[in-house]
Image (cartoon, coloured by chain):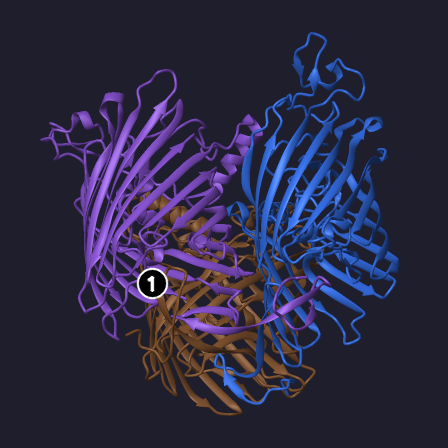
Chain colours: A blue, B brown, C purple
Amino acid sequence: QEGTKTDSIRINQYGQAVRFQPLNAEAQDGILKFTSADKSYSIWMDNRVQFDGEMFSNDAFNPIGNGASIRRARFAMKAELWNNWYGEIDLDFSGSAVELKDAYVKYTPDSDSWNIKAGHFKESFGMETTTTSRYLTFTERSLMSKFDPSRHLGFQFNHWADKYLITAGLHFSTVGDNEEVVFTQDNNKDLGVDDGYSLTGRAVFIPINDEDKVLHLGIAGTYRTPKVDLEIPYSYRFSTRSHSSINRKKYIDTDDILNVDNNTMVNFELAGRYKGFMFQSEYKLVTVNRNDDLDAINFNGFYVQGAYLLFGGHHNYNAEEGEFTRITRGKEYGDLELAVRYDFVDANDFDNGIYGGSAEGYTVGLNYHVNPNVKFMLNYIYNNNDRFANGKGKLYAGYDADGNLTKDPTNVFDADGNGGDDFGMAAFRIEIDF
Amino acid sequence: QEGTKTDSIRINQYGQAVRFQPLNAEAQDGILKFTSADKSYSIWMDNRVQFDGEMFSNDAFNPIGNGASIRRARFAMKAELWNNWYGEIDLDFSGSAVELKDAYVKYTPDSDSWNIKAGHFKESFGMETTTTSRYLTFTERSLMSKFDPSRHLGFQFNHWADKYLITAGLHFSTVGDNEEVVFTQDNNKDLGVDDGYSLTGRAVFIPINDEDKVLHLGIAGTYRTPKVDLEIPYSYRFSTRSHSSINRKKYIDTDDILNVDNNTMVNFELAGRYKGFMFQSEYKLVTVNRNDDLDAINFNGFYVQGAYLLFGGHHNYNAEEGEFTRITRGKEYGDLELAVRYDFVDANDFDNGIYGGSAEGYTVGLNYHVNPNVKFMLNYIYNNNDRFANGKGKLYAGYDADGNLTKDPTNVFDADGNGGDDFGMAAFRIEIDF
Amino acid sequence: QEGTKTDSIRINQYGQAVRFQPLNAEAQDGILKFTSADKSYSIWMDNRVQFDGEMFSNDAFNPIGNGASIRRARFAMKAELWNNWYGEIDLDFSGSAVELKDAYVKYTPDSDSWNIKAGHFKESFGMETTTTSRYLTFTERSLMSKFDPSRHLGFQFNHWADKYLITAGLHFSTVGDNEEVVFTQDNNKDLGVDDGYSLTGRAVFIPINDEDKVLHLGIAGTYRTPKVDLEIPYSYRFSTRSHSSINRKKYIDTDDILNVDNNTMVNFELAGRYKGFMFQSEYKLVTVNRNDDLDAINFNGFYVQGAYLLFGGHHNYNAEEGEFTRITRGKEYGDLELAVRYDFVDANDFDNGIYGGSAEGYTVGLNYHVNPNVKFMLNYIYNNNDRFANGKGKLYAGYDADGNLTKDPTNVFDADGNGGDDFGMAAFRIEIDF
């Protein structure tokens, strides 16, 4: 009764009789994949190395070290089983530490119009965050992407059709970082408090999706109680690095906001393509609701980016996920992609005494797609921080009236908009996926 | 001279001429496996995701947080080489940390009646502990399972025949947890003391093993000197969580027992099946022998569990390992398993001033086996701790005469057997193996 | 335009149309490998378990604990893509921690006479260090091998021909150990200093390389500024264990040498084989250049080793890498290798007040190569430390005039050359590669 189309019995290592299905081994655009003749079973790998280097301008108030790193060293196993079931384990080993990325089970009925996931995976909030790091347009996501919750434990329902896509999820804490896991375990042990939860939904409309044109409109919302994977329970904190994994300074940092009841976010997505050109933009509004009749705190951010393939290729849109996927190269020897981005984030809420800083970034990128598996990326980014983007008072924010560097925003003696540490940076990435 | 049946030479990445054997790729009940035509070579994967959630009753003395987790995220590679050799690496990445599970070499002669293992693997003590977590009847093993040594470095000899199985092992420290490895290394560096060793043996008799019936009788014993993988050398400590990986409180905890010369354990196993019904039970007696004419300390525990498959399936017994393995489902669409367990552990030795606590658990489980790779588990467990199960004095154990919660067992003003923190819990698991 | 020889289109998990190439599955001397018919694509695994045990003589001044460990538990994925591209991820999980070993991209043109690597891999310095741990002659490399930089981020150019091999590399910090990664990140954050760099080159001449004979002459040099992956920036430190991963004492340790501008090293290699006999030797000279007109500090070391295969086998030399690779066994049932080594390291520079200690080792090894994948190793090593090899003053170095053990080298009352902690050790390794 082990419901499958096989013709014999074998014994596995646990002394158990098992059915077998012969598999075809293939490289699918360089990815190793095994599939049974009836397609009811397939299993494949997903490995990735990103080697990055970054150089910074020397005129920053706070000195920044140039450096290199393995940005990602990923290994994943993914399998489709018995027609309707899917399992995945996806791991990152960069920095000689483990990060558990995706680890989940998915059920998809024969109709192939919806699925449900259970485990650890990305919440459906933030178009650039849900886009796999394999297919990012720039070396790093925008400044505001750290608002996005990314991977959390939980359940998610997805439904898609030709012109739309809807997603709803119930989520708990995260297990994607060992420090957060230890906080969760310690808080459970010492305080006995619940994990916290999130309700997250996304709707995407795709009025146009043909060979030459795509138009994508999306909206997402999330309601989030504080999770226990924080050092300080019932807090909220937003902080981000500046388009860099090498420069470890977090200019933008709200520090811990205490006494939090919940936070909500809404996100608007507008994207599309026309022939070799694509654009993508998001606007995000964040509200932190506190107890004891304290006023709500608001943050926001947005980005807009565009890219053009110079050698005749085009970008591909994945309607089932509502995001761009790998490009198609225009020439056999590759394609060159020119990309620009403007992004902005505001983590100040002066009315409520929150001075997390605001910043904007101007990015120009040049990507060479050698083949489906090898990519070279070159980015130049100019970071413009405001005077409050001083890393919770640890970083210089400008010159005072005496011409000395000061970390105190109120002492910065400069016209509005001119304070804050600003600097340019150049980044390269060499990537191989296999 | 590279003794194999191949017909050509290739060059490997180390500039070395190599023979090759063509392999057949198969999915064996969903597990990817490659085998040479002559069966002298095979290699396969063993991946596993377990997504757990747990909820606790609100009337516990000590508040407990509900939560979710990835209980296991396993990746393993296993290979049979040159007919007689076997190698394995088995890793867990749950919690974004590495645990090295199995890493060993095994030699099995052509007679296939015995083998010898060398490396890191489970000692042959504790039937439920040696059963792989893939095939557990309940979401967590019994309270007393933490007495079992589980994986340690060393050597093990196994011999099996139709009606019996014997195992003998020599073991050293463990490398299954980074904290223990660091303790071992620091103790070696600072104190220069030997690893410690264990002698562990197990004998299983299987008087009945036919299509409908199995009767399993087992006995195991172990002699153990203190290992260096402890924070405090020459100590012994027993502690356990309460059928949960989410509730981090360890009610049962003997704290460090010092001045230990060795400890011994004996374990009795009784198990069997009749058609769709199976049962399994163990009784364990632990003795901690101390230096300086101090009296020996005794602990013990037992469990008894039974399970029935409602849709006509049956449990399978693996005589080579002396344990139950995966079930056979009764229907093509799956099988439903109803299971019950009572377990008990006593970590008190009042005569010797050890108040580690005792506890019992009542468990009802419902497992839905969808296919050979996907399983849903639902458990309800009632935990009944005694008044000494107070986590080394850190947890409330009852009410005192004034009606206030107290952590001191001697102040608990209640009839014997009624003190201690008791609570119910519900747990689910969604599992996929591939 | 996805330039490959395939005949159909499939859709991958990212909604992307992909070409596929059918692959042949093979075991190549026990290693699982998949190759397309046109050889433009191949992917393979490289797994390794080394189970070690070590025993020490009891007459050492400082007691040493006997012990066992999993020395290496390696998992690697390696792929050749689109004829010219290669990607690799190689990980170690021994000790239940991750070490990111190789993670890089390599380009090799059709001429197959040169390549260029980018990512994390071994610098071309130190013949025994660049030899994979699969094929080491002894359980541990020589005392002086810790001078070698091993893996660092960066770029490397390799060119080879029949009679020579040249390599040039530009390198930055390392990501092979989480502690070093954290130092790098913290130094970047707090100090904003650059990564540091190295220029490393190697030239190998192979005047003789035929079926029976090999003669290998090599020279390598490196110029290194201090890296940021150190606890103390702008420092240099040499320390090493004594041919052991179990004995955690570092007798030889220069402690942190501060105020370092750069260090340079030169290495000479002489190696060869004649029929069943091979020999290999290296001499290394290290110079640490300091700021502020401080004198340069010098260290040096060398080893010479020979091995003979008793059953008619021979060692194989890989001219493309300039190192020995796996042996060819003389008999179908295996081959026995007898090996000897003398090695020496001097980490004293008395003129500059550096008393890091010096030591020599006498090693006899017996290796049984069962098949291409299984190896047993047995080593006896006698370690002779000088009186300065006292682990920065933490270890006993000899007896003083009163016959008491002392850690102070100047109090050791013994003829020159007789002080220092000396001891014998026996080591075994059981290894399986698959």
**Quadrant in which the C terminus of chain A is drawn:** bottom right
Mark 1 secondary-structure assignment? strand
Question: Looking at the image, which residue is at 41% across and 78% down?
Answer: B218
Q: Is residue C199 left or right of residue B386?
A: left
- Furthest residue in direction right, as rendered: A207
Residue in view at x 20 percent, y 28 percent: C409
Q: Looking at the picture, how far across and down is residue A363, in whole percent? A: 72, 37
Residue drawn at x 72%, y 56% is A325
Q: Chain of mark 1?
A: C
Q: Quadrant of the N terminus of chain A?
A: bottom right
The residue lying toward the viewer, choosing from C93 and A31, is: A31
Q: Which residue is mark 1?
A: C431
Q: Residue at x 85, y 27 (%)?
A: A351
Vertical relation: A276 (above or below) B81: above
Q: Position of residue A315 (x, y in %)?
A: 75, 55
Left or right, C90 with reference to B394: left
Q: Amino acid at mark 1?
A: Glu
